[in-house]
Image: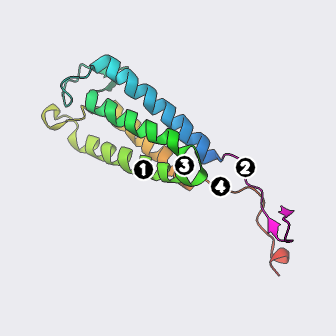
Amino acid sequence: MSLDASGRTTTARPRTTAGQHLSLVAAVVLLLVGVAGFAVSGFTDWTRGDLETSLLEFTINPLTSAVFVVVGALGLLGRRTARLARWYGVLLALVMGALAVFGYSILGDPEGNPFNINYAMTALLSVVAALGILIALVPTRLGKRPSTVELD
């Protein structure tokens, strides 16, 4: 804690927060997975339900790859400020959480699966959604909390 020009106590804020760093990590990973997904699945038949097309154990198609690239690109923008990083965390939790819920509800039905989601991809989406919640809730300020003596 320090005093500003008017004599008020201010708390130190880091240049970049943990949420911003986590946004960057999530964005880079999602962009890499999306680009690699396009390399594996190509750019045709966007909603192909082929469980043979996979990246490691994660089934993928161009639609899923596009979602990863778009959400990853938004994460690079979310890295700019702590507020944008929080909103990116909310977006990540909502989008990836919705895809994970969809994945769990559609497992075993390749006909009604436009995202070509298998169990491994659903688990990954759940982890990324949890990371989004963490990014949204991580503290943005440094410093200790005031004691009861300082509140008087």
Does residue 27 show up magenta in the picture? no
Q: Element type at marker 1?
A: helix
Position of residue 131 relative to residue 65, above or below, is below
Q: Amino acid at mark 1?
A: Leu
Answer yes or no: is residue 77 visible: yes
Left or right of 28, for residue 112:
left
Q: Are marks 2 and 1 in contact (CB under 8 Å)?
A: no
User: Which residues make up the magenta segment?
Assistant: 1-16
The rendered magenta stretch, by its main secondary structure, is classed as loop
Q: Label 4's element? A: loop
The answer to which quarter of the image holds residue 31 is top left
Q: Amino acid at mark 3?
A: Ala
Q: Residue at x 48, y 30 (%)?
A: 29
User: Which residue corresponds to mark 4?
Assistant: 140
Q: Based on the picture, tell me whether residue 9 belongs to the magenta stretch.
A: yes
Give the amino acid type for the residue marked by disc 4 in the picture.
Thr
Return the disc, 2 or 1, that comes first in the chain's sequence.
2
Q: Which mark is residue 85?
A: 3
Q: Is residue 138 left or right of residue 116?
A: right
Q: Residue at x 16, y 31 (%)?
A: 110
Q: Position of residue 111 (x, y in %)?
A: 12, 33
Q: Mark 2 belongs to which amino acid?
A: Pro
